[in-house]
Amino acid sequence: MALRSTVYKAELAISDIDRGHYASHALTIALHPSETLERLMLRLLAFSLLAEDGLQFGPGLSSEGEPDLVLADDTGRLRLWVEVGLPDEKWVRKACGRADRVVILAYGGHKAEVWWRQQQGALARHRNLSVCAIDPQASEALAKLGERSMRVDCTVQDGQIWIGIGERSITIEPVWWAGSIEAARGA
């Protein structure tokens, strides 16, 4: 018998001071049976950082070669493709060919650094690609904040992200290995 996804609900309030974006989102996020809570929370972080009208969670792990987050316009054109993790270069090439902007949110500490050193040369040719790394202590702390039903407050200012859930909060400072937050946002 196949395992089912676990459903998480998040009431997300975003105050992105850097770009003057303020919004609230009622999100339903499926935790795939092979996915960790850390990865789910990083998908939520990516949503918070890149939020704009129409951004939604893609099929991700449940459908190979599909984005974790996706933004399409009314014609079906892919405006933004987001991958969380350490994707294979061929999937990145495919994404860069299909979408206007591609963002990879890399995590895993040393493993992510090794991945970047191995992929950097091949990925450098993609002008529509931004790669962001999240510190392993920050991603682990973010995972500890996750709850099946949560009210999430997110503030983005000066490139830092503050996430608060209940009485607990953390600050995350992404490191941009390729591109920039402005390029990732299409600014």
Image (cartoon, grey):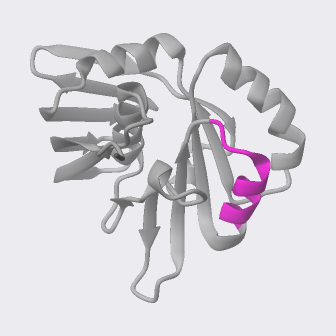
The majority secondary structure of the magenta stretch comes to: helix
- For the question of whether residue 186 can be seen, the reply is no
Asked if 53 appears above or below 38 in the picture, the reply is below
Left or right of 136 in this view: 86: right
Residue at left offset 34%, top offset 21%: 143
Asked if 71 appears above or below 27 in the picture, the reply is below
Q: Which residue range is magenta in the image?
A: 86-96
Magenta stretch encompasses residue 95: yes
Query: Quick one: which residue is furthest to the right in this view?
Result: 121
Question: Where's residue 175, x and y in %?
Answer: 59, 27
Query: Quick one: which residue is furthest to the bottom in this view?
Result: 75
Left or right of 84 in this view: 49: left
Question: Where's residue 77, x and y in %?
Answer: 52, 81
Magenta stretch encompasses residue 102: no
- For the question of whether residue 100 can be seen, the reply is yes
Residue at left offset 33%, top offset 42%: 3
Residue at left offset 47%, top offset 10%: 137
Residue at left offset 40%, top offset 43%: 49
Q: Count all numbered tags in the image, as a single digit.
A: 0
